């Protein structure tokens, strides 16, 4: 039996989901499309959850879309699974 290790991946119903921080639309890469989505939601908050609020764009889960989320996206920009 193998010893389990802590990894940033999850196994759900036999399917492996690897999510890159910043991949807002979940297509497996962080690119311009995700930047557009973040830009559209920029400035919105979870306390006012109407469009353009996009929970997927709230990368650091602090209930608002701001420069910190943009920073996190930029760190992974160009990365692909
Ligand atoms: Ca993407
Ligand atoms: Ca945020």
Image (spheres, rainbow, N blue to C red):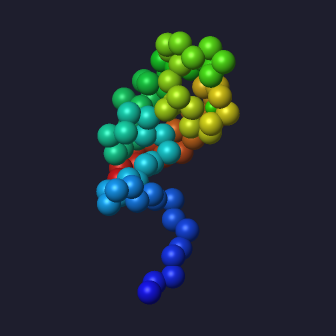
| Residue 48, position as x, y percentages in the image | 62, 14
What residue do we see at 57% from left, 17% from top? 49
Asked if residue 38 lies left or right of residue 14, the reply is: right
What residue do we see at 52% from left, 38% from top? 73
| Residue 33, position as x, y percentages in the image | 36, 29
The answer to whether residue 74 shows anywhere in this view is no
Q: Quadrant of residue 6?
A: bottom right
The answer to whether residue 61 shows anywhere in this view is yes
What residue do we see at 41% from left, 31% from top? 34
Q: Residue furthest bottom?
A: 1
Q: Quadrant of residue 28?
A: top left
Is 13 located above or below residue 75 in the figure?
Answer: below
Task: In this rendered view, identify the residue nearer to me: 9 or 11.
Answer: 11
Is 3 located above or below residue 30 in the figure?
Answer: below
Asked if residue 71 lies left or right of residue 1, the reply is: right
| Residue 65, position as x, y percentages in the image | 60, 25
Q: How many marks?
A: 0
**In which quadrant will I find the N terminus?**
bottom left
Quarter of image, ligand 2: top right
Task: In this rendered view, identify the residue nearer to me: 51 or 41.
Answer: 51
| Residue 17, position as x, y percentages in the image | 38, 53
What residue do we see at 51% from left, 65% from top? 7
């Amino acid at each position: 039996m193998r010893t389990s290790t802590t990894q940033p991946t999850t196994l759900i119903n036999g399917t492996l989901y690897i999510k890159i921080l910043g991949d807002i639309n979940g297509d497996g890469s962080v690119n311009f499309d995700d930047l557009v989505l973040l830009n559209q939601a920029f400035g919105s908050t979870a306390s006012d959850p109407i469009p353009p609020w996009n929970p997927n764009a709230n990368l650091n889960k602090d209930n608002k879309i701001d420069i910190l989320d943009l920073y996190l996206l930029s760190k992974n920009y160009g990365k692909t699974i």
